[in-house]
Image (cartoon, coloured by chain):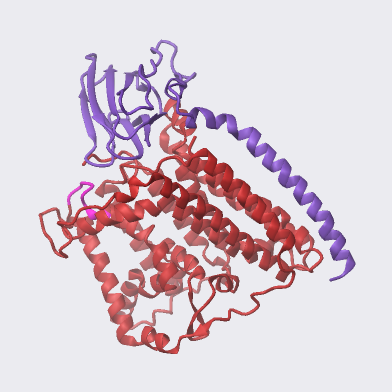
Amino acid sequence: MLIPLHGIASRRDLPLPFSFVVAGAVLALVISFAILIFAWRTPRFTRVGGRNLPRLTAVVDSRAVQLIARALVLATYAWAGLAMMAGQDLLTNPIFGFVFVWMWVGLVPISLLLGQFWRATNPLRTIHRGLCAIARVDPEQGLISLAAGIGVWPAAIGLFGFGWLELVQPDRTTLAVLRIWALAWLVILVLGAIVFGQRWIGAADPFEVYASTIAQMSIFRRVGDQLRLVNPLAGLNAWHAPPGATAVVAALLGSTAFDSFTNTSWWIQTVQNSALPTVLWGTAGLLTMIIIVFVTFSLGAAWMGRYGDRPAWEYPRLMVGSLLPIVLGYVVAHYATLLIVEGQRVAINFSDPLGRGWNTFGSAEMGVNSAIFNHPTGIAVMQACAIVGGHVFGIICAHEKAVALLPPDRAVRGQLPLLLVMIGYTCAGLFLLFSP
Amino acid sequence: MSRSTCTIRGALLRGALIWGAVALGLLLSGCSPTAEPQNTASPSAVSTPSAPPSSPAESPTWVPPSTPALSSDHPVTINIVIAKGKTIPNGVKIEARVGQKVILKVTSDADDKIQAHTGGAGYEMQVRAGTPAKGSFTLDSPGSFKVESHHLDKIIVILNAR
């Protein structure tokens, strides 16, 4: 198989038909204003609600189950690590797909279906716990306590780093490059956890922070010490976003948008005609996208400060949950086919990490079922529905928060700029999938 | 509900409708011309893209494919010129049909490998400096595929096979 110069998949989804872009944008506009004008005026999700799951909680919290889950996940990473350290420098090495497809894209469905599973089984936490057990140190205890204001800011930088690796880093599908990044990730996170205590991993691991952010939309949510089956909208509404959450969401939305943007003819022609290095264009473009999202969202949310009784700078963090459905819609539209098709290839190659013809898990002989590509219209419908659906749920969340935070007669006016910003993201998302 | 809320709501409703109509109008008027070269099933879709204006003046201009691309009966021919570190065409999108044959005619001033990532095994052709080369492959399934110069690490065309 030929190694594509950019990314790991040799095929991208076809551009979204323009009629889908127009229909999606019109639908997003109409529904947004309909919700703004006709929807409820008093908060509906004041409590998380849902149903307690005492038996499931007991199983999940039992020591044996936790140990087994952590050991299994750690073993999976160790196996992938074997492929990275001793495998062949070919695209048939499962490590590339493991990182860019299974971890990066796979964490989204895992977190939606299983809630905070990633955090509970994060191999970095397992390694750190093991080291602490050997050294007889309490894992929570570090040398320096991390200031509360740090929040998830380090993870926002980490997410920019991963976005850069995925979209800008030259030769990213070579072992030499990937090993450096993996080493940096492991050392920064584990050393940091020793210095600051385990809380560092929840503040700085881009994968865990991404996963636990997405898990806010899961049907499973822990309330107190009980797991509950909840309405995802009510669960998301109950999320207390940590400091830096806006930057995390901007990094996720911005890097996904940049991925599409680099596929437009304008970008390809401009970069390829330019005398400046491609890496410089890529870095500047990725940063610009993230900053655009961060600034527009922050300004749109801060506008609510004119109508509410809190200082303006508090609103972006209070409102950031309403961007998560939009992030989810973007991710589904961009990476669903990648996960379905390339995810299978990883499963096949995972049986043979060193390229020696092993068939450890019995998957080596399986073929990739890429029948989904024979339904381009179905894929386009799915993409448009994901973007517009994410938008509608985002608007619902924003409206709920706005009526909870602002006086009733001002809630509509206060949320209008944010609504326009969100419509902008959705139209931009659709237009980028049209990929002119 | 108080009366003041009602009036505010009425004013907002009007404002929102006006803004909605304006935005919709802008969207439709601003964007539809862009759509035509991409979506209409006419041979012009292939010949529309011309050589980029910023390419060096001494470089030959890109000759558009000679046959209608949007019928799987005829092959689509892409004339590629690689000179002084640049490719012509340069990152152009071409509409094609599943089952269509794609013919690449390449002239390069350096040894190169042209790669087409067509989903499965892909297609690769070697090009010698100064010697015109010709190769072909068939688009077996729908998707968006890149044809790249491996030596320059540049995208020559993107084939959108429907």
Q: Is residue A236 above or below residue A26?
A: below
Q: Nearer the viewer, residue A322 or B1?
A: B1
The number of discs equals 0
Q: Is residue B53 visible?
A: yes
Quadrant location of residue B32? top right
Q: Is residue A66 magenta?
A: no
Quadrant location of residue B47? top left
Q: Please tell me which residue is depicted at 38% across the width and 83% down the height of the picture.
A: A60
Quadrant location of residue B3? bottom right
Q: Residue furthest right?
A: B3
Q: Which residues are magenta?
A: A88-95
Q: Is residue B144 above or below residue A152?
A: above
Q: Please tell me which residue is depicted at 10% across the width and 54% down the height of the picture.
A: A356
* In this picture, residue B123 sits left or right of residue B156: left
Tint applied to chain A in the drawing:
red
Q: Residue furthest top?
A: B58
Tint applied to chain B in the drawing:
purple
Principal secondary structure, stretch drawn in magenta: loop
The quadrant of the image that shows the N terminus of chain A is top left
Q: Please tell me which residue is depicted at 48% across the width and 29% down the height of the picture.
A: B40
Q: Is residue A124 above or below residue B26?
A: below
Q: Position of residue A49 (x, y in %)?
A: 58, 81
Q: Is residue A296 visible?
A: no
Q: Position of residue B148 (x, y in %)?
A: 32, 31
Q: Is residue A92 magenta?
A: yes
Q: Position of residue A115 (x, y in %)?
A: 44, 73
Q: Is residue A170 above or below residue B8?
A: above
Q: Nearer the viewer, residue A364 or B35?
A: B35
Q: Position of residue A288 (x, y in %)?
A: 55, 43
